[in-house]
Every structure is written in C-alpha cells, then in structure tokens.
Amino acid sequence: MVYKPLNFHFISQRLTFVMAFASVLLGLLLCNASLGSIIPAEKPHVALHPIFGNTRITNGLDAFPGQFPHQVSLVWGWPPFLSMSHMCGGSILNSEWILTAAHCITGLPNFGTTQIIAGKHDVTLTESTQQTSNIALRITHEDYAGNVAPHDIGLFKLSTPLVLNERVVPVRLPAPGVQHTGTAVLSGWGSTSTTGSSNMPNILQFAIIPIVDNEACHESIDSVVAADVYVDPGNICTGPVGGATSACSGDSGGPLVQYIDGETPEVIGIVSWGVTPCGVTGAASVYVRVSHYVDWIEDKMANNFFIFIFFIIETVTRDNDALKHPINLLLPQRQSICTKMAIKVIALLLVLGYVASAELVQFGYNIPELGLGRVVGGSDARKGEFPHQVSLQWGVPPLQKLQHFCGGSIINSQWILTAAHCVTAVPSYGTLVVKAGKHVITKTEDTEQSINVSKTFVHKSYGGSVGPWDIGLLKLSSPLKLNKNVATINLPSPGSIPTGNSTLSGWGSVSKTSTSVMPSTLQQLVLPVINEANCKRALTLLGAPAPHSTNVCTGPLTGGYSACSGDSGGPLIRKRSDGKNEIIGIVSWGVVPCGSVGAPSVYTRVSAFNNWISSIVGSN
C-alpha cells in the first residue's frame, strides 16, 4: 500500500503525459493510455501500447560500457524549468542521422529542447564518453497514422555532427527487403517490470531474443488481447512467445540488431509496440522491419542535406521567446511511463501524462500525486447538490487546455478553501482557474462560472507531502455571482471536534486499485468520522504516519469507501442542528489502493484553522 496526498493524476506519474494536449505531446504514448478501451473485462490488465517512456527491457541484463555504441538516448526538457529526461532510444546511422520510431517524434512538443545523447551507459550520470547534440530536423513516415500503427519509423538530423569513436559508432542498415530469422539483440533503458508497474534501470539493458514470423506474432498477441490486431508486413516480431522477455516502456525507438560476421551490428528492427504488462507470457513484441524501409531512409537523408540550417534558426528563436514569455507555453516533466510516480515537477507530469497501470501494492508514503479521479464507493451527486464545491483547473491556453486537478470550497464570493498541497503543486506560470457551479467536469455547463486566481496562500507550517497544516486559500480576481448553483459553505465553530456522519464530494478516482478510474460527474459519499485514537491505531497498523491533532479522519475501516486521487482539497461536510451545512475537513491524504480495508482517509480539520482563515481573508 502507498500512502499519499489524495490529489490529482493529470499533472500525475514522468506524473502520468490521456489529455487533449498530451495527444500532441507524450501522453498518447504512455502504457495503457490511448488503447485502454480495447481491454476486455476479463483481461483488465492486458492492452496494446506504444512502447514509450523513461522506464527497461523485461528480463534483460546490464550491458557493459561501450557494448552498444550505436545506441542513443533521446532526451527532452525545458531548461531551466525542467531538466532533460530520457524519452526514447535510437540508432546512429552516421554522424548526423539517428533512426528511431515515428511515435517518439510525434509525441514530442514543438517547444523546449530535444537532444540526442550518444555514448551513454548510465542515464542518470554525466559520463566522459557521452556526446550531446540538438535536433535540427525531425522526419516521420508519411503513412504513419499515430499510436499503434504501421510505418512507425522516423529520423532525426542532428544540428552538430557526432564525433565517431569506439563509444559512438554507426549501425549498418540491412539489404532492402531481406527477411531476418534466428535471434537478435535488443538494447534500451526501458522498464524491467512484468507487472505493469515501472521498474526503471539506470544502466543500459540488453536481451538476446528469438525472431518470430508475423503469423505467429499475430496469433500470440491475439491470444491475450481481445482486439483486432494487425501485424503489418513492415513489422518484425520477437518472442519468446512462451516466456517473459520483451521490450517495454522506454525502449521505444531503440534498436533490434543482428551481428554480421559476429561483430558488425545491423539494425533489423525499431522498437514500436507491444502488450502491457510487459513480458506477458505468450505475447510477442512488435518492431518496425528496417529492411522494408531502407529506400525511404536513404531517400530522406539524401533529400534533406541542406534543410537543417533553417530549422536551427527557427528553433533558437522559439526557445528564446519561450524563456521570455513562459506564461504562454507549457513545461514538461520527468517520468517513467508505465508507473505510478511521486511528482517532482507538476509541468512535467502535464506533458507526459500519468497513467497508473498496475495494482501496485507496497508500503510507504509519497508526496502529493496529481490527477483526475472520483470518490471510491460513492454515487453521482444531483446537479446543484453541492453548490459550495469548486474545481481547481490549470493549463497554458492555447497550448494546454485547462484541466481539473483538485477540489475546493467557496467560503465567500471571492475566497476558496483548499489543501496546501494543491496550491504548492501549481507552477508560477500558466493559468489557474476556479470553476464553480460544475456538475459534469467534461462539459461546458450553463451553471458554471470560471474566474482566475489572483493570489494563493498556504499555511506557513505546512512542510509538504503527507504532513499536517495542509490548508490553503485562493483569492479570486473577481467575485463569484452567488446563486442556487454557486453558494458558500459555513465554517465550523473554532476548536470543535466533529463526530457522527459526514459527506464527501469530489471528482476523485472511483477505483479500488492503483489504476485510476475517472468519472465525469461529481461524486458524493456519506462517511463516518472516526476519532483520533482509532485513526492513529489504524494508520500505525498499516505503517503509515500518525494523524496530527489538526487532522480529522473518516472510515469505514471495513474498506470499500474513501476519498481518492482527484478529491484533494475538496470538502468534507456535515449538517448542523439548524439544518445548514458546514465544512469540517479538507481532503489531504490517504492509503492507496483507495478504499483499502483498515485504511482511514485523512483530512485537515477546518475548526483548527478558523483564526488563520480569518486572518488571511481579513488582511487581503
């Protein structure tokens, strides 16, 4: 089990990129992202996915330094805001050209910095053997349709030629049309996990694997995925179909090679797509068959000899403008793609898009995780039932549309009460908006009001992550118009200790596993408040941090009902004796998988902060 603040997946799990903007960026290439709909009910953890992300070869071995000098790492970032992160693999064709997968190219944004690093062994270190070059030109096959599709081949032309040496060596192209058989060698920094969770290596991995014919390849995938799978003649596949060795997230674009005369590497495949969880017994990995595209490769390299100089000028101009006007652009993130990861940079998660892809069970606790989700065990709220509930949304229009990441509560027409971790996770650029009067989060509704946030406040004692004093305030740039769908919530009496039943509302995950299931409609759930002693006892048994005196907890400890990812910052309310509602808690953190037996949900107790709230609102 993982203990984490219950917030937003979408700016969640190197965050995580799934989103409209991620379709242009990296999100569509994440494990389980775009093809989740093809997963049959009886096989919930098996799906097709482009093999993309910062993650290692399943059941591979550590390569020794210099063993695969043709292998490169494709990295992307936006210094100084975001550090460079490994996205894909590639192969050196000559000092200026890199062969990779088309989906590695189409998944990158047109801002920030994309680089090729050659001579790498450990991707976490700066090594004396490495050479770095920016990209001058990106080329993808004209017939590539995106995602899991044929013709998934692309080329990068470098702005600065590589210096070829014993650690930086070109790979040989095969003869056109040749059909390769036997065994081949796969290398990359992709996920080593066979469960769907990510296990990310630092060291380059390799595996010796058998080539399987396309008919057997099709049959092996069809046997585990209930979908119309098409293995194109332009693909080549590897097994073993009866074992657990495969390419995985982070290997995308990387080379599958055979050695001619035992020493000269010839690239026969480009890692393209496969079945997740990686290494599923019976399922082949699918590559681009390079011999099918030799003429295309040679033609593109010959016809783009002089073009790159103009592209470099354009790129430099774009980067300079981006640094001057960061509010107009979106930043990306760190990430392994098949995994649930603690967020380090909110924007990186936005670009890559987090997708939880396994029922990960482990002990520990994490910093807030960002994402869209719903109340576990809840039901659809009636429209207007919770008029105090708001959705916090962030984006960088027009590049990145606004997206829900946390909840909040209206305490007066210009002030929103939320969790501190929702506030601290938001970058200083982009647009932070409060949407009131919402019911269906995916629609524009006639009841909604959208107002920008002008000021943010967090409690000075909040230390981040799973900690006490997790409370924040947002001041709106203009007042809300209060009506039956947009109304304030009463604050509790100072120091009061809530008991009895309470009601939670939010758009958080409904899933009882680590894989989020995201609702469109606002959810609500009645939960019993449990006292501090029982909450502490339950969390201690789970190895979780003890609640603070300024927290309040809810059960039931029988499991099945809880707050979850996406509910963060949202309200826990109760009905007073006069029939009016008051807010008693702010969703803070809890146990994952959500709704686990014996696991309470933890909230900030609002009655401990009446004076703080009054002070901030009164002085601002």
Image (cartoon, rainbow, N blue to C red):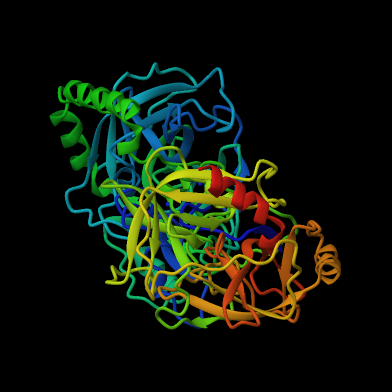
**In this view of the protein, which residue sits in the foreground, 503 or 112?**
503
**In this view of the protein, which residue sits in the foreground, 341 or 323?**
323
Number of numbered callouts drawn: 0
Residue 69 % position (x, y) = 47, 28
Residue, x 37% and y 72% (percent of image)? 483
Left or right side of 543 for 387: left
299 w.r.t. 11: above or below: above
541 w.r.t. 261: above or below: below
Residue, x 25% and y 53% (percent of image)? 151
Residue 54 % position (x, y) = 50, 45
Residue 282 % position (x, y) = 52, 70
Residue, x 47% and y 48% (percent of image)? 349
Residue 308: quarter of image: top left
Q: Is residue 501 visible?
A: yes
Left or right side of 387 for 609: right
Residue 121 % position (x, y) = 56, 30
Residue 529: quarter of image: bottom right
Left or right side of 533 for 506: left
Q: Is residue 367 visible?
A: no
